[in-house]
């Protein structure tokens, strides 16, 4: 058995398969939080679009002019294979793409938590703000300090099927949350190759996030618990933010 390290190449390949339950529930929650919101016409943007799962939300809202951006070329290629009428860009969502100001921007499934430099969050909010016109909606989710600090160090998940075994376990050190993906992938000889991928994330208290949003011309309209769809609690693990560009 080979012991190999790769970046996120295995994760990218099986991303849709291992996360389908999350996305089905998450999109329902997002549609609910937007149900009483008047959306204006224009472009819709998906920052950190990955393989394009969040685009189902945008399409369900009736948008036709859609762009997605992600740093991973592998994920963009998967997204392109699923959607042939959406403009995808391989790029850093911290860098302002100079897009025409749109009416909706999303950033989902803790994509923002992968920004581990403290200065990166306000830079990203500035990029999104520049990509929206007045009264445009910004919808994103974020994992909480409670989740990273208290849940990740105790987290274990095992997924098994005929092609691979995935073992997840987490850790939390110096304000950085770590998720280790250990893959055992069956090869053509019916043996298993081992791959290890390490994901790093960071998050901040709600008041700090709100401060950055306000500085970048966003008004927070609503924050809900992504698991329950209700008001957030002390032990909420994931938040869904609905903001409007001022």
Image (cartoon, helix red, strand yellow):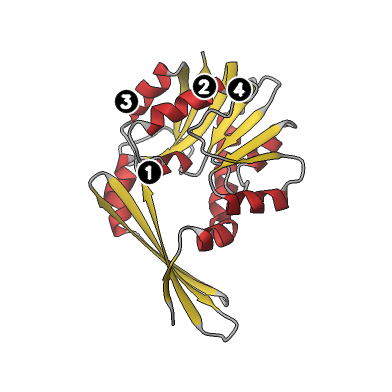
Cα separation between marks 3 and 2: 19 Å
Residue 237, numbered label = 1
Mark nearer the N terminus (1 vs 2)? 2
The quadrant of the picture occupied by the N terminus is bottom left
Residue 30 at x, y = what percent? 56, 36
The residue depicted at 66 percent of the width and 35 percent of the height is 67
User: Could you tell whether 126 is left or right of 60 in the image?
Assistant: left
- Mark nearest the camera among 1 and 2 is 2
Q: Left or right: 150 with respect to 141? A: left
Q: Which mark is residue 119?
A: none
Q: Earlier in the sequence, mark 3 or mark 2?
A: 2
How crowded is the residue under tag 1: few (<14 C-alpha within 10 Å), some, or many (20+)? some
Task: Report if the CB atoms under discs 1 and 3 are less than 8 Å apart.
Answer: no
Q: Residues within 10 Å of mark 3 (few under 14, many from 20)?
A: few
Q: Tell which circle, 3 or 4, labels the residue nearer the N-terminal end.
A: 4
* Residues at circles 3 and 4 in contact by the CB criterion of under 8 Å: no
What residue did someone put label 3 on? 207
Which of the two marks, 1 or 3, is nearer to us in this view?
Answer: 3
Give the residue at mark 2: 129
SS label for mark 1: loop
Which badge, 4 or 1, comes first in the chain's sequence?
Answer: 4
Query: Element type at marker 3?
Result: helix
Q: Position of residue 110 (x, y in %)?
A: 45, 43
């Amino acid at each position: 058995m080979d012991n190999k390290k790769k970046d996120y190449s295995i994760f990218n390949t099986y991303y849709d398969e291992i996360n389908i339950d999350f996305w089905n529930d998450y999109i329902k929650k997002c549609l609910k939080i937007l149900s009483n919101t008047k959306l204006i016409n224009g472009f819709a943007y998906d920052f950190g679009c990955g393989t394009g799962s969040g685009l189902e939300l945008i399409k369900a809202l009736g948008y036709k002019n859609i762009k997605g951006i992600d740093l991973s070329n592998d994920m963009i290629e998967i997204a392109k294979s699923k959607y042939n009428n959406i403009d995808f860009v391989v790029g850093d969502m911290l860098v302002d793409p100079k897009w025409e100001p749109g009416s909706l921007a999303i950033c989902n499934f803790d994509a923002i938590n992968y920004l581990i430099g403290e200065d990166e969050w306000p830079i990203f909010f500035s990029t999104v703000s520049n990509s929206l016109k007045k009264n445009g909606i910004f919808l994103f989710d974020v994992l909480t300090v409670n989740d990273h600090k208290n849940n990740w160090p105790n987290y274990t998940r095992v997924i098994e099927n005929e092609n691979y075994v995935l073992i997840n376990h987490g850790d939390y050190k110096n304000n950085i949350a770590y998720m280790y993906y250990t893959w055992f992938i069956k090869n053509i000889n019916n043996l298993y190759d081992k791959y290890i991928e390490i994901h790093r994330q960071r998050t901040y208290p709600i008041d700090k996030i709100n401060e950055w949003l306000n500085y970048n011309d966003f008004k927070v309209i609503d924050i809900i618990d992504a698991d329950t769809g209700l008001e957030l609690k002390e032990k909420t693990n994931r938040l869904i933010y609905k903001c409007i560009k001022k």
